[in-house]
Amino acid sequence: MLRTLFFLAAFCGLSRATSAQLLQAKPGPTRADSLRGTLTPLRTCYDINYYHLDVKLNIDDRSLSGSNLFRFTATQDFTRLQFDLFANLTVEKVVYRGQSLPFTREANAVFVTFAQPIKAGSRDEFTVFYSGKPRVAERAPWDGGLVFTKDSNGKPWVATAVQGLGASAFWPNKDHQADEVDSMLISVTVPQGLTDVSNGRLRKTTRLKGGLTRFDWAVRNPINNYDVALNVGDYTKFTDSYAGEKGPLSLEYWVLKENLAKAKTHFAANVKPMLKSLEYWFGPYPFYEDGYKLVDAPHLGMEHQSAVAYGNKYQNGYLGHDRSATGWGLKWDFIIVHESGHEWFGNNITSQDIADMWIHESFTTYSEALFTESQFGKPAGQEYLHGQRRNIQNDGPIIGPYGVNQEGSGDMYDKGSNLLNMVRTIIDDDQKWRQILRGLGQQFYHQTVTTEQVVGYLDQQSGRNLTKVFDQYLRYPGIPTLEIRQEEGKVLVRWVADVPDFDMPVRVRLKGGQYGFIQPGPRFQEIGLPGATKDNLEVDTFNYYIGVLVD
């Protein structure tokens, strides 16, 4: 998800866009943050295998009620565990083998005690029954919660958008990204005449007493908690198929009836080119078993796995604007490309801790430039990517603090995208770079990962030590500066950076010449380029997001 706000001034031509969560200072971590963000033994003692979320939505009073079945494998002996549910929702009971279990609550965490030890290796289950009024989002998807609104015909239109806020804002689960459930059944009961669209494939529709309808959606692939979605409205569906790398991929489009005509035209122009491009760069779409869906949403958009929420009003750009200010971003629908890009990075490959959310957002923001390149050529893609720099703030580390449910700087989007392009430039082999990107999806298929794993893989596959480069751009707010000076006719260069012994290769040339690589270190060294002076030496600042200081 791209959480970016444009000020009115930006719409009028100014070149800054700022991350929504950075408009005000972040408070320090609280006890509730630690309960949510830390993998204590009360959470690691069980591995989630299967959920059955069964929930009824009462639109009139904006409430819900239902249950969630937790089916798990014990990783160790235990008598107590933690699951998560926001404190404004009531846990009515926790049932284990027909008996209610005692539980306590602290902040948004629930602690359950079993009468007898659950043995390591055993498979078991319990069910949580709950009810209440979930948080209502005022500016979804940025603030998170449920959206209650109406379509143009006055019919109810409801959706969930909880990334950042947390899935436990509306359903009980182990709300930590490190443990994705292997498969899931999502049952949603709504007033008759409305349709729920959730993740996976629609298994069954059942008419119930009292003018209600239940929709059962089966998810066959692992899914992270914040991707689990409810979309309730007066939907109609049309379908298509894409001839993908793994065979036919089913395409479903669930749109409000009022949007049917324009959806058919707009989605036809955007979805298959997007899939072709992202499969080329990143490998096969990761969820063929669950299909691909676009769903009309009463908010801008969200990467809900196999049910991407769409609210860009059937126009190109980002709400009709180009985040890069190059013009290339107006030639395709930003939400379709970006949020679908998360199917590869965010949904297929998921960071274990949200402190490492750059893994989701940097690669996905980079996918925008790769898509532009696939449609209009590499120069266009590079120009678009260079234009993304206008949004960079350099206000804090991209990696956030671990274990406290806190992301880093919003620079994870555009600065992270430019970082990846620098790595591509350093590798200097586009086919190899493509194979590395595709290899990430294979190596970490349906897995949760850390920064160290991703960077380690890039090091291994590129044959280069890129760790210092990633450390500088991910762990420090500033960018490295290449200092250039001339002494006794010799041109000397060095890096000034936060990372000790920083030595990133960089491209330079004499004016009008061809670029070649040099590898400065933290101490001045001669550049070794015949004819070079500090005045005729050009540094490739188009492909490198760096500072240059000529002394």
Image: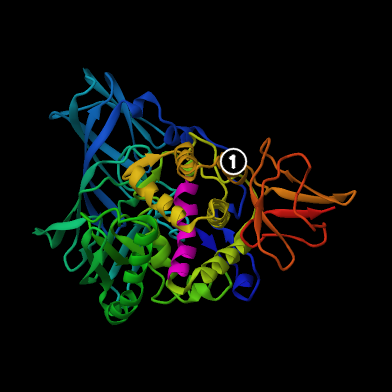
Give percent across and percent down for residue 514.
Answer: 66, 63
Q: Is residue 316 above or below residue 124?
A: below
Q: Nearer the viewer, residue 537 or 2?
A: 537
Q: Is residue 528 magenta?
A: no
Where on the picture, by quarter, is residue 461?
Answer: top left
Q: Is residue 332 shown left or right of residue 126?
A: right
Q: Which residue is mark 1?
A: 471
Residue found at x 24% / y 41%: 182
Q: Which class describes the residues within 10 Å of circle 1: few (<14), some (14-19), or many (20+)?
A: some
Please give the name of the residue rendered at 30% of the width and 75% of the height, measured from the top-left corner.
154
For the record, the magenta segment spans: 357-374
Q: Residue 236 appears at what percent x and percent y? A: 21, 72
| Dominant secondary structure, magenta | helix
> Split into 4 quadrants, where in the image is the N terminus?
bottom left
Residue at x-position 28% and y-position 24% = 75
Q: Position of residue 486 (x, y in %)?
A: 86, 51
Mark 1 secondary-structure assignment: helix
Q: Residue at x 63, y 65 (%)?
A: 16
Is residue 268 shown left or right of residue 543? left
The correct choice, above or below, for 128 with respect to 372 in the image is: above
**Residue 371 magenta:** yes
Answer whether residue 87 is visible to the viewer in this image: no
Where residue 284 sits in the image (x, y, percent)? 30, 56
